[in-house]
Image (cartoon, rainbow, N blue to C red):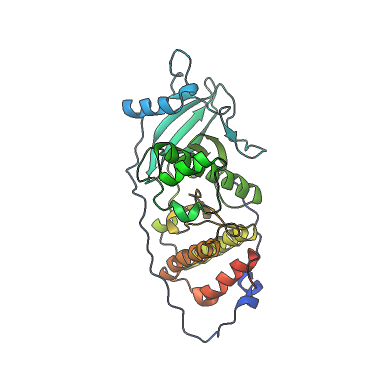
Amino acid sequence: MREHANDFSDDIFDRYAQYDDTDDDAPRAQRMRRRRADDEIGPQRRGRLTATERDLLALRREDALTEDGALPPDGDRWSTWDDGEQGPEPHPQWLITELAAVDRELGVLKTGKEADVHLVERFLPGTERSCLLAAKRYRSNDHRLFHRDAGYLEGRRMRRSREGRAVALRSDFGRNLIAEQWAAAEFAALARLWELGAPVPYPAQRVGTELLLEFVGSADGTAAPRLAQLRPDPERLQDLWRQLLEAMLLLARHGYAHGDLSAYNLLVHEDRLVLIDLPQVVDVVANPQGLDFLERDFRNVAGWFAARGLGVEERDPETWVRVLRAEAGLEG
């Protein structure tokens, strides 16, 4: 991960004291209990694709294979770099963009209700150059797809009435559209947030319903842990809390809310927080429920930190909700 400039000094709490009209001697606010129906996490595995997975991948990316169907040497497909949208420029130096590169599947990082995340190595044959990517592949034919999407999709409109009807009816065509719409929305959000300096993985490319993202983890393919998996000491907890506030304020300042923020979609890599899983990113102005999402995001993560012993009463949650609204230009 790149280093992000610290937009806030150590007096981050004092800078927003104007929003705090609570009594410093008042009792601690009741904390929300952590509630999360987490995506099912499958066991990590290493190794080549199974025959079934290879068939599915070939169907998804027929144009990534040679005309005679031959696989690239030591890989599962040729690079798809020139097939779709590419990430913001300048591209990071670690990213391999040569069309002669090969993608090799290394295993499954995560399985979820709407998408699976695979670990992919992209390498240039005959050289020592390689990089690791997280391939997030949305399911386009699952009847459970995006069971929570109604609120998030408000403010997003389809160009054609036929497409809008298909989405509303959740036909096969409509679910395919939803999957690609969410993939495109996540890619666009990541690209924009990366340009703004937010702590998100670099979005390398999007082809249809597949996103290739910067892999957040170690060089041996071990993924960074989620915040929910950690039990940080008080000093580290305070530092992570400050990082989270900075990230949320940055998003709000530019009109965004994560939409589903919790300790389960925050990674911690080399003591830095990284926001992930942003297909449901919300435009807090265009979406009628934008403020609700903004407030829910904060209360979800504040509850987790409070349960781990952080004195969130330093600034009451009600205060920070007002701060976020103000940053988004929606306060008073």
- Residue displayed at 45% across by 12% down: 68
Q: Residue 331: give x, y in percent of width and height.
A: 63, 70
- Residue displayed at 41% across by 26% down: 59
Q: Residue 158: give x, y in percent of width and height.
A: 54, 44
Total of numbered circles in the picture?
Answer: 0
Q: Residue 144: give x, y in percent of width and height.
A: 35, 46
Up/down of 137 relative to 103, above or below: below
Q: Residue 28: give x, y in percent of width and height.
A: 46, 80
Residue extending furthest top?
Answer: 68
In which quadrant of the rendered image does the C terminus lie?
Answer: bottom right
Among the 4 quarters of the image, the one containing residue 18: bottom right
Say which of 184 and 224 sits in front. 184
Q: Is residue 221 visible?
A: no
Say which of 189 and 141 sits in front. 141
- Residue displayed at 62% across by 52% down: 4
Among the 4 quarters of the image, the one containing residue 46: top left
- Residue displayed at 60% across by 78% down: 20
Q: Is residue 103 visible?
A: yes
